[in-house]
């Protein structure tokens, strides 16, 4: 059998048995359309011209042993096959098997064969370097690292980045010693100094990493990766303000798509949406083919109510098949119309979402808007159809329908939906909690208390349910001590929750413990803009004679929530 036939047989064998060795990296050949390069090393191995039965047996036995989880016989058979056929693929599989079992001697033997048979394989060189490091042979590791740099140069890759990526998989001082030797050899190479910074960061030697970054940026001040690594180092040390300052300065002085996007995402996290949108747009200007940036801009344009930009962006994503976002674009165009009050247009857009991850959400929005447009019967039929086609989401669909009816000022209809849902799912805490909230709003204290306690029997440590029960008792009964006990338990479980802070403050206010009440209510209003929290804070301030602050709080709340009727009544009462 010819050597070409040998390669074909082994390729077919590997394909047939690939499922049993999914944890092994597959050997791949360079794409045929890649430019040919002159590689620095030549293999001295000469494969046999014929594939004899012993070689074929070892190939098959090795693969079957992998399938059975018997790694040692698999290694032995693959090594025999590699040695007899001078085959790099078999050697690579044997090397990885031994490496994953922490058998460094076997890994070294197999990797040596792999490098011998395929000396320009970067994966082989990386594993050889790591094996040398883990056997405390720094000179051999350096030799392999230099080979990686030569091969990478020939293949037009960043060799120092490949080195630092490989070193990320191991720990210890030897990797630091290796990268420092290389950095000293290439003092004017920004990529070498950056690799040193990366490896130092991996070992949490942050001062050393920052010094390397200083050197890197003196060599190449416009390169964006060092800025991003500096931000990461500050963040890892908890220096968030310093990280933000570096990122902001880099975005303004050395803008690149990656820096601008990173800073924009930071602004998003801080809910500074208009500013984030501006930086995302700058990033897109520099990287116009980045579809994900366009997508984020579309979402932020909706968030900031930049309707023209939102429409332009989502229509572009819808109409150009290169983006592959047509279905998602129809959904967000539905949101665009809904947010502007164009409910019929929104419904038509939602109905055009036929496939993809937003299909169910679009169907929910269609049902909700159908009810808002006045056809409650049709909406109910749509919700029922959704429960039949997506039974795993039936509970969430029941809650969505009931909440929609509540928003439409039809609490009795909403209650019927909850009754139907709880008949079908009597032990579901989410449904009991949701109906309890509705009952509390309807001042049906008895049902609310019953539902909250039933939910707590299912999930006794749920802070939201404990808080809801405590607040309802405080707001609608004179059982204030009992209410406070529930709220204290909720507070212990979630001390930062604005809702729980508000409940604690309101209950203490009703107990005439005004100074304590103000402490909690101030914290709640700081953490969340909410009309009910502001009304409670205003009443507690009024009770302590702080009328100027009451005026300031209510003026602020009135501007934020001009249509909230409960807040309006408090404003009229405390004028």
Image: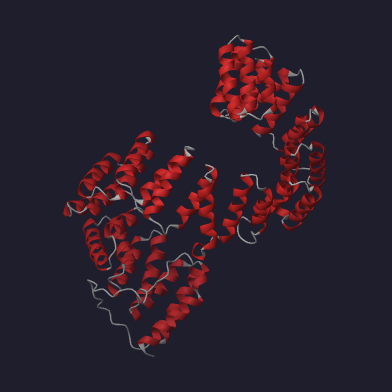
What's the image's color scheme?
A: secondary structure
Find residue 567 and report its image quarter: top right
Residue shown at the point (62%, 25%) measured from the top left: 533
Residue shown at the point (71%, 18%) measured from the top left: 481
In the depicted structure, whether residue 459 falls above or below residue 145? above
Identify the image quadrant of the N terminus: bottom left
Where residue 271 sits: x, y (%)?
Answer: 49, 38
Q: Is residue 421 left or right of residue 192?
A: right
Find residue 143 and report its image quarter: bottom left
Where residue 278 sits: x, y (%)?
Answer: 42, 44
In the depicted structure, whether residue 228 falls above or below residue 434? below
Where residue 288 sits: x, y (%)?
Answer: 41, 57
Residue at far bottom of view: 1
Badge count: 0
Residue 4 shows in the view: yes
Identify the image quadrant of the C terminus: top right
Q: Say which of 201 and 416 sits in front.
A: 416
Q: Is residue 272 left or right of residue 364?
A: left
Where residue 512 sits: x, y (%)?
Answer: 67, 12
Find residue 461 and report its image quarter: top right
Residue 461 shows in the view: no
Q: Say which of 403 and 180 sits in front.
A: 403
Residue shown at the point (61%, 17%) measured from the top left: 517
């Amino acid at each position: 059998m010819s050597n070409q036939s040998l390669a074909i047989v082994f390729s077919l064998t590997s394909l047939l048995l690939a499922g049993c060795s999914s944890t092994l990296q597959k050997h791949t050949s360079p794409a045929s359309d890649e430019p040919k390069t002159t590689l620095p090393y030549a293999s001295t191995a000469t494969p046999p011209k014929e594939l004899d039965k012993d070689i074929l047996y070892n190939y098959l036995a090795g693969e079957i042993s992998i399938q059975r989880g018997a790694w040692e016989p698999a290694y032995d058979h693959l090594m025999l096959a590699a040695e007899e056929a001078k085959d790099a693929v078999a050697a690579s599989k044997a090397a990885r098997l031994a490496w994953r079992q922490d058998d460094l001697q076997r890994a070294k033997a197999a990797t040596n064969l792999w490098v011998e048979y395929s000396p320009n394989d970067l994966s082989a060189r990386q594993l050889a370097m790591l094996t040398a490091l883990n056997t405390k042979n720094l000179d051999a590791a350096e030799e392999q690292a230099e080979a990686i740099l030569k091969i990478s140069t020939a293949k037009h890759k960043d060799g120092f980045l490949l080195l630092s990526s490989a070193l990320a998989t191991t720990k210890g001082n030897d990797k630091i010693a290796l990268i420092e030797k290389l950095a000293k050899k290439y003092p004017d190479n920004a990529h070498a100094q950056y690799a040193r910074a990366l490896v130092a960061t991996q070992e949490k030697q942050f001062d050393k990493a920052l010094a390397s970054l200083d050197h890197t940026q003196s060599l190449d001040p416009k390169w964006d990766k060092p800025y991003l690594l500096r931000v990461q180092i500050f963040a890892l040390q908890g220096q968030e303000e310093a990280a933000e300052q570096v990122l902001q300065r880099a975005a303004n002085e050395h803008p690149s798509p990656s820096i601008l996007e990173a800073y924009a995402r930071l602004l998003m996290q801080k809910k500074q949406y208009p500013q984030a949108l501006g930086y995302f747009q700058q990033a897109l200007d520099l990287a116009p083919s980045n579809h994900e940036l366009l997508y984020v801009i579309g979402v932020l344009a909706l968030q900031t109510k930049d309707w023209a930009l939102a429409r332009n962006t989502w229509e572009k994503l819808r109409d150009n098949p290169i983006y592959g976002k047509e279905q998602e674009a129809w959904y967000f165009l539905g949101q665009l119309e809904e947010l502007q009050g164009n409910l019929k247009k929104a419904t038509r857009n939602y109905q055009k979402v036929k496939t993809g991850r937003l299909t169910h959400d679009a169907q929910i929005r269609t049902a909700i808007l159908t009810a808002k447009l006045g056809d409650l019967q049709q909406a109910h039929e749509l919700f029922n159809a959704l429960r039949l086609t997506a039974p795993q989401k039936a509970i969430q669909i029941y809650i969505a329908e009931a909440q929609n009816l509540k928003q439409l000022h039809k609490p009795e209809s909403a209650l019927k939906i909850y009754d139907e849902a709880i008949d079908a799912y009597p032990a579901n805490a989410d449904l009991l909690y949701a109906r309890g909230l509705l009952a509390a709003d309807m001042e049906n204290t008895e049902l609310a208390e019953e539902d909250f306690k039933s939910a707590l029997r299912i999930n006794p440590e749920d802070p939201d349910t404990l808080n809801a029960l405590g607040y309802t008792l405080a707001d609608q009964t004179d059982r204030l001590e009992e209410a406070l006990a529930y709220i204290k338990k909720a507070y212990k479980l979630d001390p930062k929750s604005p809702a729980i802070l508000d409940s604690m403050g309101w209950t203490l206010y009703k107990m005439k413990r005004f100074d304590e009440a103000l402490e909690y209510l101030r914290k709640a209003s700081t953490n969340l803009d909410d009309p009910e929290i502001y009304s409670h804070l205003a009443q507690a301030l009024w009770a302590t004679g702080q009328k100027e602050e009451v005026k300031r709080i209510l003026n602020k709340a009135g501007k934020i929530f001009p249509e909230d009727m409960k807040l309006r009544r408090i404003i009229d009462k405390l004028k």
